[in-house]
Amino acid sequence: MRTQVAIVGGGPAGLMLGRLLERRGIESVILEARDREYVQQRVRAGVLEQATMDLMDEVGLGGRMHREGLVHEGVELRFDGEGHRIALSDLTGGRAITIYGQQEVVKDLIEARLESGPPLHFDVGDVVVDPETGVVTYTHAGERQRLEADLIAGCDGFHGVCRPTIQDVLTVYERVYPFGWMGILAECAPSSEELIYAHHERGFALASMRSHEVTRMYLQCAPDAEPWPDEQIWDELDTRFGMGVNRGPIFEKGVTPMRSFVVEPMQHGRLYLAGDAAHIVPPTGAKGLNTAMADVALLASSIGDEAALQAYTRRALERVWRVQHFSWWMTSMLHRMSDDPFETRIQRSQLRYTVTSTAQATALAENYVGLPFITA
Ligand code: APR
Ligand code: PHB
Protein backbone atom coordinates (compact mmCIF):
# COMPACT_ATOMS: atom_id res chain seq x y z
CA MET A 1 0.00 0.00 0.00
CA ARG A 2 1.14 3.57 -0.69
CA THR A 3 0.16 6.92 0.79
CA GLN A 4 1.63 10.39 1.04
CA VAL A 5 1.65 10.66 4.84
CA ALA A 6 1.59 7.75 7.30
CA ILE A 7 0.27 9.04 10.62
CA VAL A 8 1.16 6.90 13.63
CA GLY A 9 -1.27 7.58 16.50
CA GLY A 10 -4.92 8.60 16.48
CA GLY A 11 -4.92 10.99 19.44
CA PRO A 12 -5.69 14.68 18.98
CA ALA A 13 -2.41 15.35 17.13
CA GLY A 14 -2.72 12.50 14.60
CA LEU A 15 -6.43 13.04 14.00
CA MET A 16 -6.14 16.81 13.51
CA LEU A 17 -3.15 16.35 11.19
CA GLY A 18 -5.20 13.90 9.13
CA ARG A 19 -8.07 16.38 8.94
CA LEU A 20 -5.84 19.29 7.91
CA LEU A 21 -4.16 17.17 5.21
CA GLU A 22 -7.51 15.97 3.90
CA ARG A 23 -8.56 19.60 3.44
CA ARG A 24 -5.37 20.26 1.50
CA GLY A 25 -5.95 17.23 -0.76
CA ILE A 26 -3.03 15.28 0.71
CA GLU A 27 -3.52 11.54 1.28
CA SER A 28 -2.90 9.97 4.64
CA VAL A 29 -3.43 6.76 6.59
CA ILE A 30 -3.86 6.92 10.38
CA LEU A 31 -2.74 3.93 12.45
CA GLU A 32 -4.01 3.78 16.04
CA ALA A 33 -2.99 1.09 18.55
CA ARG A 34 -6.18 1.17 20.65
CA ASP A 35 -9.83 0.67 19.76
CA ARG A 36 -12.25 3.50 19.04
CA GLU A 37 -14.08 3.29 22.38
CA TYR A 38 -10.86 3.44 24.38
CA VAL A 39 -9.58 6.51 22.52
CA GLN A 40 -12.91 8.31 22.89
CA GLN A 41 -13.31 7.57 26.59
CA ARG A 42 -9.78 8.42 27.72
CA VAL A 43 -10.15 11.34 30.16
CA ARG A 44 -7.58 14.06 29.59
CA ALA A 45 -7.38 17.85 29.64
CA GLY A 46 -10.24 20.15 28.81
CA VAL A 47 -9.05 23.68 28.06
CA LEU A 48 -8.94 24.83 24.44
CA GLU A 49 -6.90 27.91 23.64
CA GLN A 50 -8.31 30.49 21.26
CA ALA A 51 -6.09 29.18 18.42
CA THR A 52 -7.26 25.58 18.99
CA MET A 53 -10.87 26.77 18.79
CA ASP A 54 -10.03 28.65 15.60
CA LEU A 55 -8.43 25.49 14.16
CA MET A 56 -11.55 23.42 14.93
CA ASP A 57 -13.58 26.07 13.08
CA GLU A 58 -11.12 26.15 10.17
CA VAL A 59 -11.48 22.40 9.62
CA GLY A 60 -15.28 22.68 9.80
CA LEU A 61 -15.69 20.91 13.14
CA GLY A 62 -16.42 23.75 15.55
CA GLY A 63 -20.21 23.22 15.70
CA ARG A 64 -20.58 21.03 18.78
CA MET A 65 -17.66 22.81 20.50
CA HIS A 66 -19.53 26.13 20.22
CA ARG A 67 -22.83 24.58 21.32
CA GLU A 68 -21.56 22.56 24.27
CA GLY A 69 -18.26 24.20 25.21
CA LEU A 70 -18.10 26.83 27.95
CA VAL A 71 -16.29 30.04 27.01
CA HIS A 72 -14.28 31.55 29.87
CA GLU A 73 -12.99 35.11 29.88
CA GLY A 74 -11.13 34.93 33.17
CA VAL A 75 -9.49 32.64 35.73
CA GLU A 76 -8.98 32.99 39.46
CA LEU A 77 -5.73 32.74 41.40
CA ARG A 78 -6.36 32.00 45.08
CA PHE A 79 -3.77 32.36 47.83
CA ASP A 80 -3.65 33.47 51.47
CA GLY A 81 -7.37 32.70 51.64
CA GLU A 82 -8.37 35.22 48.97
CA GLY A 83 -9.35 34.92 45.30
CA HIS A 84 -8.10 37.29 42.60
CA ARG A 85 -9.50 37.35 39.06
CA ILE A 86 -7.22 37.53 36.03
CA ALA A 87 -9.34 39.10 33.29
CA LEU A 88 -8.02 37.00 30.40
CA SER A 89 -10.10 38.57 27.65
CA ASP A 90 -9.76 42.20 28.79
CA LEU A 91 -6.00 41.76 28.96
CA THR A 92 -5.63 40.09 25.54
CA GLY A 93 -7.86 42.09 23.21
CA GLY A 94 -10.82 39.72 23.56
CA ARG A 95 -9.18 36.29 23.36
CA ALA A 96 -10.66 33.53 25.54
CA ILE A 97 -10.50 29.82 26.37
CA THR A 98 -13.19 27.19 25.98
CA ILE A 99 -13.82 24.28 28.31
CA TYR A 100 -14.41 21.28 26.05
CA GLY A 101 -12.98 17.87 26.96
CA GLN A 102 -10.13 16.50 24.88
CA GLN A 103 -12.14 13.35 24.28
CA GLU A 104 -14.93 15.47 22.76
CA VAL A 105 -12.40 16.93 20.30
CA VAL A 106 -11.26 13.38 19.56
CA LYS A 107 -14.87 12.19 19.02
CA ASP A 108 -15.55 15.03 16.57
CA LEU A 109 -12.37 14.31 14.60
CA ILE A 110 -12.96 10.53 14.47
CA GLU A 111 -16.55 10.92 13.35
CA ALA A 112 -15.54 13.30 10.54
CA ARG A 113 -12.73 10.99 9.40
CA LEU A 114 -14.89 7.88 9.33
CA GLU A 115 -17.59 9.77 7.43
CA SER A 116 -15.40 11.27 4.74
CA GLY A 117 -13.26 8.29 3.90
CA PRO A 118 -9.47 8.41 4.30
CA PRO A 119 -8.25 5.34 6.19
CA LEU A 120 -8.17 5.33 9.99
CA HIS A 121 -7.27 1.90 11.37
CA PHE A 122 -7.83 1.08 15.03
CA ASP A 123 -6.32 -1.87 16.89
CA VAL A 124 -3.07 -1.95 14.91
CA GLY A 125 -0.17 -3.78 16.54
CA ASP A 126 3.63 -3.93 16.39
CA VAL A 127 4.12 -0.73 14.42
CA VAL A 128 7.67 -0.38 13.05
CA VAL A 129 8.72 2.83 11.27
CA ASP A 130 11.73 3.32 9.01
CA PRO A 131 12.72 7.01 8.96
CA GLU A 132 15.08 6.45 6.00
CA THR A 133 12.65 4.85 3.54
CA GLY A 134 9.28 6.01 4.90
CA VAL A 135 8.06 2.42 5.19
CA VAL A 136 5.73 1.56 8.08
CA THR A 137 4.91 -2.06 8.89
CA TYR A 138 2.17 -3.13 11.30
CA THR A 139 -0.29 -5.87 12.13
CA HIS A 140 -3.99 -5.32 11.46
CA ALA A 141 -6.80 -7.89 11.61
CA GLY A 142 -4.22 -10.61 12.16
CA GLU A 143 -2.14 -9.77 9.08
CA ARG A 144 1.17 -8.03 8.67
CA GLN A 145 0.82 -4.90 6.50
CA ARG A 146 3.35 -2.68 4.72
CA LEU A 147 2.67 0.99 4.04
CA GLU A 148 5.03 3.11 1.92
CA ALA A 149 4.86 6.85 2.59
CA ASP A 150 6.68 9.99 1.51
CA LEU A 151 6.64 11.08 5.12
CA ILE A 152 5.82 9.60 8.53
CA ALA A 153 4.16 11.70 11.25
CA GLY A 154 4.98 10.39 14.72
CA CYS A 155 1.84 11.39 16.66
CA ASP A 156 1.91 8.36 18.96
CA GLY A 157 2.19 10.17 22.28
CA PHE A 158 4.78 9.94 25.04
CA HIS A 159 4.82 6.10 25.14
CA GLY A 160 4.80 5.54 21.39
CA VAL A 161 7.36 3.87 19.11
CA CYS A 162 8.39 6.76 16.83
CA ARG A 163 10.59 8.75 19.24
CA PRO A 164 12.55 5.66 20.46
CA THR A 165 13.26 4.74 16.81
CA ILE A 166 15.40 7.87 16.41
CA GLN A 167 16.63 8.21 20.00
CA ASP A 168 20.30 8.08 18.94
CA VAL A 169 19.99 11.46 17.23
CA LEU A 170 17.90 13.13 19.97
CA THR A 171 18.86 15.27 22.92
CA VAL A 172 16.42 15.03 25.85
CA TYR A 173 15.65 18.00 28.13
CA GLU A 174 13.68 16.88 31.15
CA ARG A 175 12.44 17.75 34.61
CA VAL A 176 10.45 15.35 36.77
CA TYR A 177 8.49 17.01 39.59
CA PRO A 178 8.31 15.37 43.02
CA PHE A 179 4.50 15.37 43.02
CA GLY A 180 1.47 14.42 40.95
CA TRP A 181 -2.16 15.48 40.54
CA MET A 182 -5.08 13.49 41.87
CA GLY A 183 -7.95 14.26 39.49
CA ILE A 184 -11.65 13.62 39.93
CA LEU A 185 -14.77 13.98 37.81
CA ALA A 186 -17.95 14.35 39.86
CA GLU A 187 -21.64 14.78 39.18
CA CYS A 188 -22.23 18.20 40.68
CA ALA A 189 -22.34 21.80 39.57
CA PRO A 190 -18.96 23.58 39.55
CA SER A 191 -18.32 25.58 42.73
CA SER A 192 -17.29 28.63 40.77
CA GLU A 193 -18.10 29.99 37.30
CA GLU A 194 -14.42 30.26 36.42
CA LEU A 195 -11.42 27.98 37.02
CA ILE A 196 -9.64 28.42 40.35
CA TYR A 197 -5.90 27.80 40.71
CA ALA A 198 -5.21 27.66 44.46
CA HIS A 199 -1.88 27.96 46.28
CA HIS A 200 -2.05 26.46 49.78
CA GLU A 201 0.56 25.42 52.33
CA ARG A 202 -0.77 21.84 52.08
CA GLY A 203 -0.37 21.88 48.30
CA PHE A 204 -1.94 23.08 45.07
CA ALA A 205 -5.61 22.59 44.13
CA LEU A 206 -7.49 23.30 40.90
CA ALA A 207 -11.24 23.65 40.39
CA SER A 208 -12.32 23.07 36.81
CA MET A 209 -15.40 21.66 35.09
CA ARG A 210 -16.69 19.85 32.05
CA SER A 211 -20.21 21.29 32.00
CA HIS A 212 -22.75 22.98 34.27
CA GLU A 213 -23.42 19.53 35.75
CA VAL A 214 -19.93 17.99 35.89
CA THR A 215 -17.06 19.18 38.08
CA ARG A 216 -13.37 18.44 37.43
CA MET A 217 -11.00 19.00 40.37
CA TYR A 218 -7.37 18.26 41.08
CA LEU A 219 -5.17 18.07 44.20
CA GLN A 220 -1.40 18.04 44.39
CA CYS A 221 -0.36 14.65 45.86
CA ALA A 222 2.60 12.28 46.04
CA PRO A 223 3.55 11.15 42.51
CA ASP A 224 2.89 7.50 43.34
CA ALA A 225 -0.20 8.07 45.55
CA GLU A 226 -3.13 5.68 45.38
CA PRO A 227 -6.38 7.63 44.87
CA TRP A 228 -7.79 8.63 48.26
CA PRO A 229 -11.30 7.78 49.54
CA ASP A 230 -13.93 10.27 48.27
CA GLU A 231 -14.52 11.84 51.68
CA GLN A 232 -10.83 12.61 52.16
CA ILE A 233 -10.65 14.21 48.71
CA TRP A 234 -13.64 16.50 49.37
CA ASP A 235 -12.32 17.53 52.80
CA GLU A 236 -8.91 18.33 51.38
CA LEU A 237 -10.47 20.36 48.55
CA ASP A 238 -12.46 22.39 51.12
CA THR A 239 -9.27 23.06 53.08
CA ARG A 240 -7.15 24.09 50.10
CA PHE A 241 -9.81 26.30 48.49
CA GLY A 242 -10.82 27.72 51.87
CA MET A 243 -14.54 27.16 51.16
CA GLY A 244 -17.07 24.36 51.11
CA VAL A 245 -17.01 23.09 47.50
CA ASN A 246 -20.07 21.46 45.91
CA ARG A 247 -20.02 17.70 46.34
CA GLY A 248 -21.51 14.88 44.26
CA PRO A 249 -20.86 11.27 43.21
CA ILE A 250 -17.29 10.85 41.95
CA PHE A 251 -17.27 8.75 38.76
CA GLU A 252 -13.61 9.01 37.76
CA LYS A 253 -10.46 9.23 39.87
CA GLY A 254 -6.79 9.01 38.93
CA VAL A 255 -3.26 10.19 39.67
CA THR A 256 -1.08 11.78 36.97
CA PRO A 257 2.66 12.26 37.44
CA MET A 258 4.12 15.62 36.39
CA ARG A 259 7.02 16.23 34.09
CA SER A 260 8.50 18.66 31.62
CA PHE A 261 10.14 16.96 28.63
CA VAL A 262 11.41 18.07 25.21
CA VAL A 263 13.44 16.30 22.54
CA GLU A 264 15.48 18.09 19.94
CA PRO A 265 15.33 17.83 16.97
CA MET A 266 11.69 16.95 16.26
CA GLN A 267 12.52 15.27 12.94
CA HIS A 268 14.93 12.81 11.34
CA GLY A 269 14.90 11.61 7.73
CA ARG A 270 11.27 11.17 6.73
CA LEU A 271 9.99 11.04 10.32
CA TYR A 272 8.44 14.13 11.98
CA LEU A 273 7.33 14.08 15.63
CA ALA A 274 4.34 16.08 16.87
CA GLY A 275 2.52 16.46 20.21
CA ASP A 276 3.29 14.32 23.26
CA ALA A 277 5.64 12.16 21.14
CA ALA A 278 8.08 15.11 21.19
CA HIS A 279 7.26 17.00 24.39
CA ILE A 280 5.33 16.91 27.65
CA VAL A 281 4.31 19.75 29.96
CA PRO A 282 2.96 19.60 33.50
CA PRO A 283 -0.79 20.29 33.22
CA THR A 284 -0.75 23.51 35.27
CA GLY A 285 -0.89 25.77 32.22
CA ALA A 286 -3.36 23.50 30.34
CA LYS A 287 -1.00 23.42 27.38
CA GLY A 288 -0.59 19.72 26.38
CA LEU A 289 -3.44 19.43 23.90
CA ASN A 290 -2.98 22.96 22.57
CA THR A 291 0.73 22.47 21.90
CA ALA A 292 -0.03 19.24 20.05
CA MET A 293 -2.46 21.21 17.88
CA ALA A 294 0.13 23.93 17.25
CA ASP A 295 2.65 21.31 16.06
CA VAL A 296 0.29 19.71 13.58
CA ALA A 297 -0.96 23.05 12.25
CA LEU A 298 2.68 23.86 11.44
CA LEU A 299 3.48 20.39 10.09
CA ALA A 300 0.39 20.25 7.86
CA SER A 301 1.25 23.62 6.34
CA SER A 302 4.89 22.54 5.79
CA ILE A 303 4.19 19.29 3.97
CA GLY A 304 4.84 19.66 0.26
CA ASP A 305 7.41 22.43 0.75
CA GLU A 306 10.93 21.04 1.27
CA ALA A 307 12.35 24.24 2.81
CA ALA A 308 9.43 24.50 5.24
CA LEU A 309 9.88 20.86 6.25
CA GLN A 310 13.56 21.46 6.90
CA ALA A 311 12.58 24.38 9.15
CA TYR A 312 9.91 22.38 11.06
CA THR A 313 11.99 21.66 14.16
CA ARG A 314 13.26 25.22 14.51
CA ARG A 315 9.81 26.78 14.08
CA ALA A 316 8.00 24.28 16.28
CA LEU A 317 10.54 24.48 19.11
CA GLU A 318 10.25 28.25 19.36
CA ARG A 319 6.64 27.88 20.48
CA VAL A 320 7.29 24.64 22.38
CA TRP A 321 9.87 26.31 24.64
CA ARG A 322 7.61 29.30 25.30
CA VAL A 323 4.95 26.87 26.45
CA GLN A 324 7.52 24.91 28.47
CA HIS A 325 8.53 28.06 30.32
CA PHE A 326 4.93 29.07 31.00
CA SER A 327 3.96 25.61 32.29
CA TRP A 328 7.07 25.37 34.48
CA TRP A 329 6.44 28.90 35.81
CA MET A 330 2.78 28.22 36.69
CA THR A 331 3.78 24.90 38.27
CA SER A 332 6.58 26.43 40.33
CA MET A 333 4.48 29.37 41.48
CA LEU A 334 1.47 27.32 42.60
CA HIS A 335 2.69 24.01 44.06
CA ARG A 336 4.30 23.13 47.34
CA MET A 337 7.74 22.54 45.85
CA SER A 338 9.63 21.71 49.06
CA ASP A 339 9.55 22.35 52.82
CA ASP A 340 11.67 25.46 52.38
CA PRO A 341 9.84 28.57 53.77
CA PHE A 342 12.00 30.82 51.56
CA GLU A 343 10.39 29.20 48.53
CA THR A 344 6.87 29.77 49.89
CA ARG A 345 7.56 33.46 50.43
CA ILE A 346 8.96 33.83 46.92
CA GLN A 347 5.79 32.17 45.58
CA ARG A 348 3.51 34.49 47.54
CA SER A 349 5.41 37.50 46.29
CA GLN A 350 5.16 36.26 42.71
CA LEU A 351 1.42 35.61 43.11
CA ARG A 352 0.80 39.02 44.68
CA TYR A 353 2.76 40.71 41.87
CA THR A 354 0.81 38.74 39.24
CA VAL A 355 -2.57 39.88 40.58
CA THR A 356 -1.58 43.50 41.18
CA SER A 357 0.65 44.36 38.21
CA THR A 358 -1.15 44.75 34.88
CA ALA A 359 2.09 43.90 33.08
CA GLN A 360 2.51 40.60 34.93
CA ALA A 361 -1.21 39.72 34.73
CA THR A 362 -1.06 40.36 30.97
CA ALA A 363 1.95 38.04 30.67
CA LEU A 364 -0.06 35.29 32.37
CA ALA A 365 -3.18 36.03 30.31
CA GLU A 366 -1.54 36.05 26.88
CA ASN A 367 0.26 32.78 27.55
CA TYR A 368 -2.85 31.21 29.08
CA VAL A 369 -5.18 32.05 26.17
CA GLY A 370 -2.26 30.98 23.98
CA LEU A 371 0.09 32.59 21.54
CA PRO A 372 -0.89 32.38 17.87
CA PHE A 373 -0.10 29.18 15.98
CA ILE A 374 2.69 29.53 13.43
CA THR A 375 2.22 28.15 9.91
CA ALA A 376 4.77 27.80 7.13
N1 APR B 1 1.12 2.69 17.25
C1 APR B 1 -0.03 3.36 17.00
N2 APR B 1 -0.61 4.21 17.87
C2 APR B 1 0.00 4.39 19.04
C3 APR B 1 1.20 3.73 19.38
C4 APR B 1 1.76 2.85 18.43
N3 APR B 1 2.89 2.19 18.67
N4 APR B 1 1.56 4.11 20.63
C5 APR B 1 0.63 4.97 21.06
N5 APR B 1 -0.33 5.15 20.12
C6 APR B 1 -1.51 5.99 20.16
C7 APR B 1 -2.16 6.10 21.53
O1 APR B 1 -3.05 5.03 21.76
C8 APR B 1 -2.89 7.42 21.43
O2 APR B 1 -4.20 7.29 20.94
O3 APR B 1 -1.13 7.31 19.86
C9 APR B 1 -2.07 8.24 20.42
C10 APR B 1 -1.32 9.38 21.06
O4 APR B 1 -2.26 10.28 21.59
P1 APR B 1 -1.97 11.24 22.85
O5 APR B 1 -1.19 10.49 23.85
O6 APR B 1 -3.26 11.83 23.23
O7 APR B 1 -0.97 12.34 22.26
P2 APR B 1 -1.22 13.58 21.27
O8 APR B 1 -2.13 13.24 20.17
O9 APR B 1 0.13 14.14 21.00
O10 APR B 1 -2.03 14.62 22.15
C11 APR B 1 -1.46 15.32 23.24
O11 APR B 1 -2.75 14.27 24.92
O12 APR B 1 -1.57 13.36 26.73
C12 APR B 1 -2.43 14.35 26.30
O13 APR B 1 -2.01 16.14 27.75
C13 APR B 1 -1.74 15.61 26.49
O14 APR B 1 -3.52 16.89 25.88
C14 APR B 1 -2.29 16.40 25.40
C15 APR B 1 -2.53 15.49 24.28
C1 PHB C 1 -9.06 20.36 33.21
O1 PHB C 1 -10.19 20.85 33.22
O2 PHB C 1 -8.89 19.14 33.06
C2 PHB C 1 -7.87 21.22 33.40
C3 PHB C 1 -8.04 22.60 33.49
C4 PHB C 1 -6.93 23.41 33.67
C5 PHB C 1 -5.67 22.85 33.76
C6 PHB C 1 -5.50 21.48 33.67
C7 PHB C 1 -6.60 20.67 33.48
O3 PHB C 1 -4.60 23.66 33.96
Image (cartoon, grey):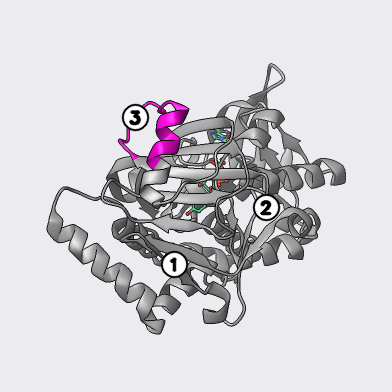
Q: Position of residue 28 (x, y in %)?
A: 72, 47
Q: Name the kind of residue labelled 1 in the image.
A: Arg
205, above or below 48, in the image:
above
* Disc on the earlier residue, 2 or 1: 2
Magenta region, residue range = 221-236
Residue 213 location, x and y as percent?
A: 67, 44
- Rendered-image quadrant of the N terminus: top right
Residue corresponding to mark 2:
16
Question: Where on the picture, by quarter, is residue 330?
Answer: bottom left
Q: Nearer the viewer, mark 3 or mark 2?
A: 3
Q: Are the residues tagged 2 and 1 within 8 Å (C-beta)?
A: no
Q: Is residue 291 left or right of residue 141?
A: left
Q: Which residue is mark 3?
A: 225
Magenta-span inclusion, residue 228: yes
What's the residue type where badge 2 is placed? Met
Camera-side mark, 1 or 3: 3
Of pointers 1 and 3, the one earlier in the residue sequence: 3
**In this rendering, position of residue 252 left or right of residue 279:** right
Separation of marks 3 and 2 at Cα, in angstroms: 34 Å
Foreground: 166 or 11?
Answer: 11
What element does badge 1 sit on?
Answer: helix
Per the image, the residue denoted by label 1 is: 314
Total marks placed: 3
- Look at the picture and state if 112 lies above or below 91: above
Q: Amino acid at mark 3?
A: Ala
